[in-house]
Image (spheres, helix red, strand yellow):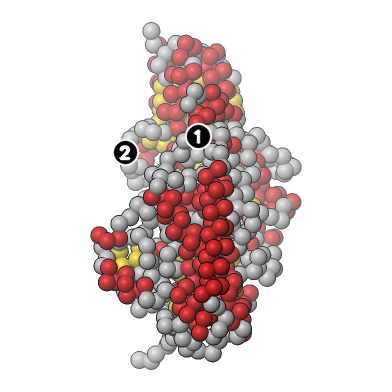
């Protein structure tokens, strides 16, 4: 008998839950001021999230999936990516989308039942949010293959949750990324819960990162609540992807919210568990470190809160004042040209007496 | 100009389009070095390289989902599913993504992909290799479903499918892959999608079919002709979206219609055509619409498959019934 394969999964963290630096900071974080844009983006995402939930609770938004407590993952991804890269998001990646220029009002429009919320003004090649879990991983393979075929230096970044790693599309995609040495980065938001099923109920694998190994990819675990680590490790993975090695990053975090506004997590998890994870919050740890090193203050925090609140309020105003689409729009983007076979149905819809009200189901 | 089989016409169309449009890629299981298990892609990898003629891992959902990603990036993927029996894991990608990417993004991203698969029974194939489940795809908004029934239409319709700006399911009736040869000029001329092809004109009864069953349908028309019954034969060719006008116009003249398909009866595309005639052609009908189809049961293994497949005799009898109806 001999051992023929060994592997190691590294864990990366720079800023621990107490806001202490535990490793030599990467170059971009050497000047604490450079972290302020990341801090702002996390704060913005959280303010947006509070507002979105308030809108849902008052019947002004549909079912909504909150990224509460996981803002560092998206912000790290967003700042590591270059504009020309392509993001293939899951449904809890607003933070990354905002950094890439997707408007706050787009995300509100989407969860408010309007397809125009997927017609992003920026990041035009990014995919819209994927709802069928893990299906987006296969799209990422296609996008990355196109980049490699055209000899581009661009990279595809694909997001997925811990539950998604149980699905076939995830494995099929990792496998293909290895075979073709694609410029691809998978980021798993391991927030410990897939609706009501905990991480332990998804896989007996010690880490989710090691699923990369079987596919011939690089895999590592990152503190997903440390935005410095997320920015650094996604950045390293993007560089690696350009050399033809795809990476799986397992970002360890915790879903502080219900699965969606339609869920009640108190049915399956305890307040004690929530309290314990609240102490690992990504925003307060960066705040505490920035204050400690003298690069942030209460006054700055207050000014920022006010500025971002205005920004969110403005987005809400844009969203709420946006007139519903014409009902016939449900036919107008089905094909490039609507086939003759469906023209009569479109006409019927256009002429229906109640059709012009454009009511949306906000479930 | 060369005489060729349907499968050779498929290869010729792929080669033509790959030569004139560098965005076109072929991907699937065994499509490269091996040229496909039916040889549909033979020679393409030698000619266009392994980056454009891609042997994929054995993973159907990946193949379709990857094609969505390629298409969204402006390429023109032609993905092959080796047999229709293996297409079901692809339904999620086609229904949830390919068919609605344009609609979801209000036209920002589109999905000009073709998904090819051989389908149908009658070649003594193993289990899961003989079903005709085209109706599954005909039910999905945003797709086109195209089925050729001759070498010439395979060439022209596949070219059209590859040039279409939206996703096309291109189902190839494998029973007639090598049944007949005809001259197919390699001129890059596409045939129109979304229209039926009237293969034979007649005045007494309209026979509507597609794919491999066109063979039995034409033979039935010959038999009926011997009985002085003039049958019009329509090849639907694009089963989604349906060319209603051609079918309605024909039945308005003949007053009788028999729909023939290999797929099971319930929920088949024939039901849609029968509903069309009931809804928009009722006053022209002189007899109930007849359906000659596969039975509502599991496709038997091949010792019994000939009992399952609609026969010429069943088509002839159904046509006679429409004429005898009072």
Name the residue at the top extreme. Answer: B326
Please name the residue that numbered disc 1 is placed on.
A358
Residue at 42 percent across and 77 percent down: it is A210
Name the residue at the front extreme. Answer: A299
Q: Chain of mark 1?
A: A
Q: Nearer the viewer, residue A260 or A234?
A: A260
Residue A168's spot in the image, x, y percent? Answer: 41, 62
Q: Would you call the spot at circle 1 few (<14 residues within 10 Å), some (14-19), or many (20 or more)?
A: few
Figure check: B45 above or below B121: below
Please name the residue that numbered disc 2 is placed on.
B297
Residue at 47 percent across and 88 percent down: it is A22
Q: Chain of mark 2?
A: B
Figure check: A148 above or below A327: below
Q: Nearer the viewer, residue B54 or B35?
A: B54
Residue B206's spot in the image, x, y percent? Answer: 51, 20
Q: Which of labels 2 and 1 is toward the front? A: 1
Q: Is there any visible trace of residue A240 in the rendered image? A: no
Q: Is there any visible trace of residue A305 in the rendered image? A: yes
Residue at 64 percent across and 44 percent down: it is B165
Q: Nearer the viewer, residue B201 or A115?
A: A115
Q: Secondary structure at mark 2?
A: loop
Q: What's the distance in space between the residues labelled 2 and 1, CA to CA?
A: 43 Å
Quarter of the rendering occupied by the C terminus of chain A = top left
Q: Nearer the viewer, residue B118 or B58?
A: B58
Q: Secondary structure at mark 1?
A: loop
**Is there a contact, CB below 8 Å, between mark 2 and mark 1?**
no
A162 displayed left or right of B66: left
Residue B291's spot in the image, x, y percent? Answer: 41, 25
Residue B122's spot in the image, x, y percent? Answer: 43, 42
């Amino acid at each position: 008998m001999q051992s023929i394969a060994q592997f190691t999964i590294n864990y990366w963290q720079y800023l621990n839950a107490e806001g202490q630096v535990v490793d030599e900071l990467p170059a971009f974080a050497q000047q604490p001021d450079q972290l302020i844009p990341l801090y702002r983006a996390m704060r913005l995402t959280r303010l947006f999230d509070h507002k979105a939930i308030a809108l849902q609770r008052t019947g002004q938004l549909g079912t909504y999936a909150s990224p509460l407590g996981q803002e560092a993952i998206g912000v790290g991804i967003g700042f590591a990516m270059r504009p020309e890269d392509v993001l293939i998001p899951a449904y809890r990646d607003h933070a990354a989308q905002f950094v890439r220029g997707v408007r706050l009002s787009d995300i509100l429009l989407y969860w408010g039942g309007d397809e125009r919320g997927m017609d992003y003004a920026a990041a035009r090649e990014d995919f819209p949010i994927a709802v069928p879990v893990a299906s987006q991983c296969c799209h990422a393979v296609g996008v990355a293959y196109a980049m490699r075929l055209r000899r581009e230096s661009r990279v595809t970044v694909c997001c997925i949750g811990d539950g998604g790693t149980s699905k076939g599309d995830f494995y099929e995609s990792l496998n293909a990324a290895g075979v073709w040495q694609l410029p691809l980065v998978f980021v798993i938001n391991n927030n410990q819960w897939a609706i009501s099923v905990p991480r332990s109920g998804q896989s007996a694998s010690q880490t989710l990162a090691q699923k990369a190994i079987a596919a011939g990819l690089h895999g590592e675990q990152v503190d997903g609540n440390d935005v410095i680590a997320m920015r650094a490790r996604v950045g390293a993975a993007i560089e690696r992807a350009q050399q033809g090695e795809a990476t799986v990053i397992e970002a360890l975090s915790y879903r502080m919210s219900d699965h969606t506004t339609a869920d009640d997590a108190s049915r399956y998890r305890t307040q004690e568990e929530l309290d314990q994870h609240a102490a690992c919050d990504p925003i307060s740890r960066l705040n505490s470190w920035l204050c400690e090193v003298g690069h942030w203050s209460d006054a700055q925090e207050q000014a920022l809160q006010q500025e971002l609140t205005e920004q969110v309020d403005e987005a809400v105003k844009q969203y709420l004042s946006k007139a519903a689409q014409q009902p016939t729009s449900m036919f107008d983007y089905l094909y490039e040209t609507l086939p003759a076979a469906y023209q009569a149905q479109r006409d019927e819809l256009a002429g229906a007496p109640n059709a012009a009200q454009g009511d949306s189901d906000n479930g | 100009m060369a005489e060729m089989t349907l499968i050779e016409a498929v290869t010729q169309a792929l080669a033509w389009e790959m030569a004139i449009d560098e965005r076109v890629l072929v991907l699937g299981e065994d499509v490269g070095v091996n040229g496909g298990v039916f040889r549909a892609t033979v020679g393409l990898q030698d000619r266009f390289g392994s980056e454009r003629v891609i042997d994929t891992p054995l993973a159907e959902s990946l193949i379709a989902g990857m094609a969505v990603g390629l298409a969204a990036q402006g390429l023109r993927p032609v993905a092959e599913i080796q047999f229709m029996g293996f297409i079901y894991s692809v339904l999620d990608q086609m229904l949830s993504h390919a068919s609605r990417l344009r609609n979801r993004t209000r036209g920002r991203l589109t999905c000009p992909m073709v998904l090819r698969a051989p389908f149908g029974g009658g070649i003594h194939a193993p289990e899961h290799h003989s079903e005709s489940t085209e109706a599954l795809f005909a039910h999905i908004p945003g797709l086109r479903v195209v089925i050729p029934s001759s070498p010439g239409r395979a060439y022209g319709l596949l070219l059209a499918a590859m040039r279409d700006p939206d996703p096309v399911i291109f189902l190839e009736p494998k029973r007639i892959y090598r049944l007949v040869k005809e001259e197919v000029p390699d001129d890059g001329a596409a045939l129109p999608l979304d229209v039926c092809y009237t293969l034979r004109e007649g005045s007494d009864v309209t026979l509507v079919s597609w794919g491999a069953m066109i063979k039995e349908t034409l033979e039935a028309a010959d038999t009926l002709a011997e009985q002085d019954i003039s049958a019009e034969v329509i090849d639907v060719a694009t089963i989604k979206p349906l060319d209603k006008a051609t079918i309605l116009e024909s039945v308005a003249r003949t007053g009788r219609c028999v729909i023939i398909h290999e797929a099971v009866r319930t929920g088949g595309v024939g039901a849609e055509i029968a509903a069309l005639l009931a809804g928009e052609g009722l006053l022209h009908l002189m007899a109930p619409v007849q359906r000659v189809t596969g039975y509502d049961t599991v496709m038997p293994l091949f010792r019994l498959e000939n009992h399952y497949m609609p026969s010429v005799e069943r088509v002839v009898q159904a046509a006679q019934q429409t004429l005898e109806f009072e």
